[in-house]
Image (cartoon, rainbow, N blue to C red):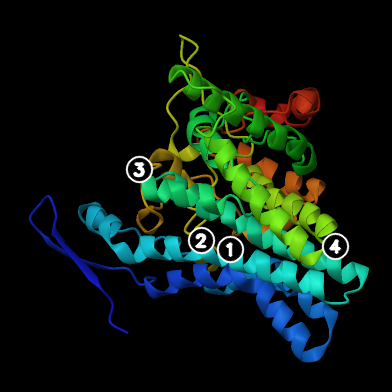
């Protein structure tokens, strides 16, 4: 297959030719949301209900294994070709195509759950894996919602209807990016805070912040909050239409199916938010203002496989430094906070809090901009005295 090249001239007059070696591999992002349908097909062929749980195997065993086998890619596009790379329509078309695929995956799984005589555990399992896959729709909405075009932002609102998380792009763009890596941000995890405690703060906190932001926007425009102009309600209305239609078509089984689906779709986002900024803290200046977000305020991962199926979400440091930059152009920086694996692998670690703390707390304190100084760490207030006692020798070293 022919690889497209991008040409430019560097500042010192040297000719540049850049090829994205992963160009065609980005299409994996189209296949990943369809995993539940593969499990359904294998169940249809064999009658073995365990196949319905296939996305758990591919997501939490095969994906970390692939990241380990394929390793990391620290390759960056030269600055001189980034504009060309951003304008290449191939990459954005992938994000457009994946939007209906999220709907197809949910509707297909709901059809199978509602029309087949599944055991209780198989119905629960199918709802969970479909929810986890729909959680990737939030990642799609994340990529689209950061763009300036009205078309892409509309697509973001549409795809966020699948995981029933229509407030995300407002909360994320105008709330999380403003408050990231500060104690005020419900979507930034604190040192000593387990993912389960974090979820009880992040999920309701993110919704409250999104609603406040949207209410403020509508008030400035002299429009009522409860109106068709409310962008959160627009996406919620699509969710209501979609899920009520599934309930009418496939019956009472859709009630537990959709409740579990929605909860685990949200959990997928919670897992990402938890690992992306754990313990990292932006400093305040003498006027009480937080410093500008820098690449070292996000945990990064260059693992190839998980980046390919997540639209480069794991190059999170450059994303926060340049939110409008498209996924194919995100860069690696040296000496960044670095996760020990791709997201799917570190999710598993995060689900076991004592293991997460054992691995990540020393890694956090060893960062070049922290160097054991707990004043430079975002610490869970309820764990502060315990953490200070535990790491007092490190902090004073």
Label 1 SS = helix
CA gap between label 2 and label 1 equals 6 Å
The quarter holding residue 37 reads bottom right
The answer to whether residue 334 of the structure is visible from this angle is no
Q: Which numbered disc, 4 or 3, marks the residue that appears first in the sequence?
A: 3
| Quadrant (top left, top right, bottom left, bottom right) of the C terminus | top right
Of discs 4 and 3, which sits in the foreground? 4
Q: Position of residue 351 (x, y in %)?
A: 77, 52
Q: Residue furthest left?
A: 13
Which residue was labeled with disc 4? 253
Q: Position of residue 28 (x, y in %)?
A: 50, 72
The quarter holding residue 190 reads top right
**Residue placed at 83% from the left, 55% from the top?**
255
Mark carried by residue 99: 2
Disc 4 to disc 3: CB gap under 8 Å: no
Q: Which numbered disc, 2 or 4, marks the residue that appears first in the sequence?
A: 2
Which residue was labeled with disc 1? 102
**Residue placed at 79% from the left, 70% from the top?**
113
Q: Residues within 10 Å of mark 3 (few under 14, many from 20)?
A: few
**Residue placed at 80% from the left, 55% from the top?**
260
Q: Toward the viewer: 281 or 152?
A: 152
Q: Which numbered disc, 3 or 2, marks the residue that appears first in the sequence?
A: 2
CA gap between label 1 and label 3 equals 22 Å
**Residue placed at 73% from the left, 28% from the top?**
380
Q: Position of residue 98 (x, y in %)?
A: 50, 64
Q: Is residue 391 left or right of residue 230?
A: right
**In the displayed structure, would residue 146 be above or below residue 140?**
above
Label 3 SS = loop
| Quadrant (top left, top right, bottom left, bottom right) of the N terminus | bottom left
Of discs 2 and 4, which sits in the foreground? 4
């Amino acid at each position: 297959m022919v690889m497209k090249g991008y040409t430019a001239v560097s500042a010192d007059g040297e000719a540049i030719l850049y090829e994205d070696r992963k160009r065609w591999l980005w299409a994996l992002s189209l296949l990943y949301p369809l995993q539940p349908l593969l499990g359904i097909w294998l169940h249809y062929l064999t009658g073995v209900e365990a196949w319905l749980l296939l996305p758990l195997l591919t997501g939490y065993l095969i994906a970390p294994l692939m990241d380990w086998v394929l390793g990391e890619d620290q390759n960056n596009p030269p600055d001189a070709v980034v504009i060309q790379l951003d304008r290449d329509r191939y990459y954005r078309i992938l994000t457009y195509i994946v939007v209906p695929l999220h709907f197809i995956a949910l509707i297909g799984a709901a059809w199978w759950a509602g029309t087949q005589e599944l055991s209780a555990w198989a119905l629960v399992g199918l709802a969970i894996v479909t929810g986890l896959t729909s959680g990737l729709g939030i990642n799609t909405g994340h990529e689209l919602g950061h763009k300036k075009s009205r078309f892409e932002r509309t697509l973001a609102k549409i795809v966020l209807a699948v995981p029933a998380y229509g407030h995300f792009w407002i909360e994320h763009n105008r709330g999380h990016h403003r408050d990231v890596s500060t104690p005020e941000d419900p979507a930034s995890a604190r040192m000593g805070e387990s993912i389960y405690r974090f979820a009880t703060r992040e999920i309701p906190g993110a919704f409250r912040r999104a609603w406040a932001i949207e209410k403020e926007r509508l008030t400035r425009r002299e429009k009522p909050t409860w109106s068709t102009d409310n962008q959160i309600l627009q996406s919620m209305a699509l969710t209501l239409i979609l899920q009520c239609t599934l309930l009418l078509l496939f019956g009472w089984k859709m009630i537990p199916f959709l409740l579990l689906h929605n909860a685990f779709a949200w959990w997928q986002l919670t897992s990402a938010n938890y690992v992306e900024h754990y313990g990292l803290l932006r400093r305040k200046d003498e006027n009480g203002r937080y410093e500008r977000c820098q690449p070292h305020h996000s945990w990064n991962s260059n693992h190839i496989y998980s980046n390919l199926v997540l639209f480069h979400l794991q190059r999170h440091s450059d994303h926060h430094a340049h939110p409008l930059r498209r996924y194919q152009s995100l860069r690696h920086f040296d000496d960044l906070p670095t996760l020990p694996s791709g997201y799917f692998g570190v999710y598993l670690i995060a689900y076991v809090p004592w293991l997460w703390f054992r691995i990540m707390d020393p890694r956090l304190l060893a960062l070049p901009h922290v160097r054991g100084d707990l004043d430079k760490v975002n610490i869970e207030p309820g764990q502060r005295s315990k953490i200070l006692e535990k790491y007092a020798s490190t902090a004073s070293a």
